Amino acid sequence: MENAPSIPNRKPGRLDSWWGALLVLMALLGSAAGTIGLWWRVAPQQPSPLERYWPTSSGVSLLYRVSNPDGTSHYLSRNVENVPGQDILNMLDGSGFLALMTALGVDLDQFDPNSAQQALLAGEYARIVETEYLLDGTFVTATTVLLVEPTSVSVLQLGSVAFDPPQPLLDSTMREGSVQVLTGLINSSIPYTATIELEGQEELVTPAGPFEDCLRVRHSIVVPGYQADDRTWYCAGIGIARMESSSTTSPGTKAYELASVSAPGQVRAFAPPAALPISQEWGEHAQLQRDYPQTQVDGLEARWSYQENRFNSGITTPPLPVAGLLLYGTQNGGLVALDLAQREILWRFQTGSTIYGAPVVADGLVFVTSSDRHVYALDLSTGAFRWAFETQDAIPGSPAATGELVYVGSEDGTIYALHRRNGEVCWRFAAGGPIASTPVVAGRLLYVASDDGALYALDAETGTPRWAFASDGPITAPPAIAGDALYVGSQDKTLYALDTRTRHKEGEVLWKFYAREEILNEPIFSEGTIYLALYRDIYALDAASGEKRWHYASETQLYGTPLRLGHRILIRRNSDVLALDARTGSEIEAIPTGSSSAYAGLSSDGQVLFVSYFDGRLELFVVNRGAP
Amino acid sequence: MSDPGRSPLRRPWALVKTSLQVILEGLRTFFWEGLKEGLIDLRPLSHVLRLVTIVGLLLVFAFLGSILFGNFLRTHNTIEPLVYESSQSRGLLVPSAAVPLTLVAIVLAWSYLLAGALHVQRAARWAILVIYAFFGLLSLMMGTLSGSGPASPFDLTVIGGVYAGVLVLVITAFILLPHRKLPVALEFILMLSLNTALVVINLLQNTAVQLNTGFPHTTNQITTMADDTFMFIVPSLLFMGLEMANFGFDVAGWAVQAIRRYTQEWIAALLLIVFLGYRLFHLAGSLLSTGISAGQWRAWAGGLILLAGLVLIFLWRQRQKTRGGWPSQGFVFVLILGLTLFQILAAMLSSSASTFFLLNASRPGAVDNLGQLSDLAADVSRAGDWLSRLSNLYREYLFLITAGVGLVIAGVALHRHRATITAFGLVLAWSQGLEWLTEPGRPLEALHYEYADVDVLLLLALTAFTLFKIVPRLVQRKAPVSEGHTPDQSGSAPAAGPTLYVLGLALLGAILTQTSFLDNPFSPFFEFAGVFFLVFGILWNVLTAGGRFANTSTPAFPRASRLLLYVGYILLSVTITHWFIVSHNAYAQMLQSDISAQGFRRYGLVLAYLAFVEAGRPLLGESEPTEEQALPDQQQLIS
């Protein structure tokens, strides 16, 4: 065996002294600076002075109380969404497209698709969806597409009205008292003149509280036979906090005052109006992918598939069928409400980041969590924003709603109990680690598991800890409760059955089942049996004793929680949904799904199976007559 | 000792004062001096080495701070989704500030490792290069290739060219530089520049793709890199678990050595009785409040079986005349490395198979041959599946394999008359074999036990020994215990009395079981339970690494190389660990904590049991490892 190489002795030189150290220090700094400098191109940037007043980041949601000239009032909800260049064309009509091309400097006479695409991708856009409740119980929605440039924000298209050039809203080059006048065409034919004047900076008091740093801006637009004048207060971190609007077609002034707000780092809630019934449908650019022919084959049969035609729209939550709608969250932070009868999107609400927890519906309100640290309360009928609550970290699990409270576990390690009506905190409890699992309420207790390996049983009304059970690994799956037993799987590879009547501080174990693999999915309880899906195995266990009833070993990887459909247990695999006999574990059929599916959900009557995919596709299967 | 000239009223104060002086002096002499001895000594180093060591260790401490208070980065930063790593059961996000920090640390860590490898023994040097090629270069290349697509600025030729060029340059450096003594500054800057070039092309590619598509490629590719590098840091994670036992050895050793120097045997005996009494009282209180379940009785039965085997080894060991050398840290590290080598190789093969597929998928015209590409994907998938199954099988039987290795060690050591090493091999074989048998799903699963269960039995055994052997002996003969004796670190010190041995073992046992406060969900420390072993292990390793590894120099491993290799490996381990922790990747964290706990259970506890088998002598420095006493092939193994 050779020793270290023989090295000729060398006298220490300059590079062995401070000079060498200086050179190394410079190299270290250079390497670090180069790395950080390149990363900086995609680093989240601080907002410019203008953006301080106009947050165009996804998920900013606002609720206004609108005071009408006749003394009545109603509400308007506003939801802001960042739109990538790939999607912007889906949101514009022909006039809007032409206006955008002109704004981007694309020569339409010598149209070069490549340069046009590059200009499109390089641009920044935002979309604002407004839902306005009217006094007659109906509501209207309006969509505004904004062009966000380094020094200005302007309206590209408002509903079906496209502005060429875009109508300016704010310009960071303006100073107090300065006025800008712009002329252009609406829908390439009607001339318009827009005036914008920065009147001053002041404090503003709204029903949602005072805002110190606001700009007062006057807008006016004149078209033949019509003139509208607005005075708008843009507040830092919020956007529009107040607006007074008048026009030649409607006498008097209409005032919009901020009632609730959810913006990055800022949440203020206000008691929202009562929920309203569905009375209007609202479509969006999405497409029915495939309509399968119906057959007389018994069993599960694919009926249709659907895909939202947007960038990064992979489905990231189990689909939730409710009241004729199918709710699901997407990678790009959208909560989609699909009308199952019409097979089109009824509404879409934008949060600030990916949604990983399935939404929950209670009394006409949808509660949805997001990785943008917020939980949102929305109107089920319209998707209109009602209130939001901000935690310190992302919220990966679903909320739980019962009685007057909504419970949310956050990665900040805290479980929050919020008042359902306005999102105010009723109590909070700090666990020892991040909470990724969905809380579960049963009786007077709230059960929540944490990455610290513990399952906590808290008083649902007060948050007082009743007992806790510590496993040896993180618990990310929610527990299942049946009778006096609670079943929870831990990443210490063990499924525990705990006694919910535990009187001691430490949870009492009824039995435990060693699974030999980390348990990531929720166990399901049905007819005295616990079904547990692992990486490649499904176990059916006796719920009373933990004894194994049957075991199925799959050739390929299994995904998610199993579903019980009649006498079948359904579980997703790489390219199919496997159906097993719930009593024996024998394979009944494998329903091909084409590609790797993400999630699955069952309708409440157990007759429809929804399978969602990472590419944003959604497939609907129906149980035909005669199916077991 | 009494002072006739002093007032009797002042005696208690004088006793307290003397006790305090003894404690402070003991702390200063043993704890502080011991700790100082373990620290990396920067004084004899050149300015360059001092600088790179300090920079590396500062980064290590910064990452450790961030691991302990990981939520700070998350709550004060934008958090970005990790799309590839997220699953149905959990969506993962990472604070954006962790991205550049991780990239800078990875570049630095590999630069340390490569610069450190230049002047070590040839086989080790090339082994490090192979490891770099698979875990460093390949994972960066995978990250770069993951951004390949219509929006990427570089095609396969450019990316492949840059990575191949850097590999050729590193190989050239590894051939030429070991024989030319260039200044360390130049060697380090060369390695740093090459690695920085790789990260630059990686970032140019991924940031461009991100700007064009809006998909967070730059952040997501780091997860791929972290996953690919994970197997390489497994030995360090195991070693960090072992550090918990080392901490117990050090502290118990310092305590009994201080007691031996400054007190008399009867005081030591009194301390022992009080200490054992306190622990028994605490144990009885705990058992009375909760009761003893059937499961607890079974766990104690399992612990008793372990103890029975240890007693047999103890009795055999007592009959041996030779003392033998204590297994050195290097020996244990080589053992750990040897037992994880298969899994490291499997990870390397799996990683290279994925890269091979990505390279084929990225080449021009690949889209025209989708059929072939699909076949290739299926082949790669099958190969990965096969490797993964093999690796899982190995993991499933690792306790048994370790037990087998223990028997081989015992056989070789017995043949060469190394009694302590033979005992080590036997303890390893017995404890690991029993661990396998009592694991859930195995024949003796009902008797599954933890160290806490064994600790109770050891406590009772030590108490019985104290009551029936030590107390009667002291009553009959009140002889002082070598007062004023200075312990000899070389191992030639005369044997201390059994009181000190038992006291040392009692302290060791108590320290090793002091993690129960972490297991209580209502404890304020519960938050740190998951990372406790890991962070504590890394911290203790860094604090004591100097004395064990980095302050010494051999022709095969010169001191400068040791330092760079040590700092590089620790930095890489901490960086990858930190990434998983700040991204709240519970699965990876669980795996890391599990591996650290395995290090404690599989190797740390084996050494602790060996201390019991050796009747506590190693705690008093009476069985320190020496070159002669170590396993004959130890140096070769380390090399």
Image (cartoon, coloured by chain):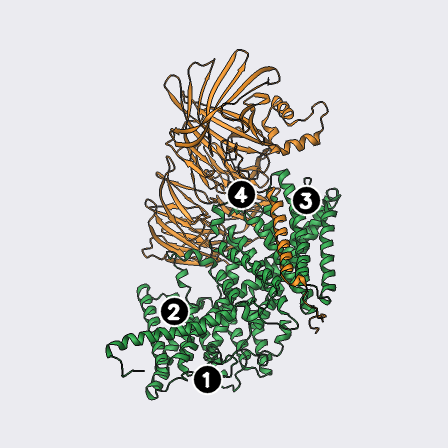
Chain colours: A orange, B green
User: Residue B504: x percent and y percent?
Assistant: 42, 76
In which quadrant of the rendered image does the C terminus of chain B lie? bottom right
Q: CA distance from mark 1 to mark 2?
A: 38 Å
What's the amino acid at mark 2? Trp
Instruction: Same chain for labels 1 and 4? Say yes or no.
Output: no
Q: CA distance from mark 3 to mark 4?
A: 28 Å
Give the answer, above or below, for where B436 lies relative to A46: below
Q: Earlier in the sequence, mark 1 or mark 3?
A: 3
User: Residue A174: x percent and y percent?
Assistant: 53, 26
Chain of the residue under the numbered disc 2 shown in the image: B
What's the amino acid at mark 4? Tyr
Q: Earlier in the sequence, mark 1 or mark 2?
A: 2
In the image, what residue occupies the spot 45% across and 67% down? B448
Number of the label disc, if any, that sits on residue A599: 4
Q: Tag 4: Cα neighbours inside 10 Å, few (<14), some, or many (≥20)?
A: many
Number of the label disc, if any, that sits on residue B495: 1
Residue assigned mark 3: B148
For the residue pair B582 and A433, the one nearer the viewer reads as: B582
Q: Which secondary structure lies at badge 3? A: loop
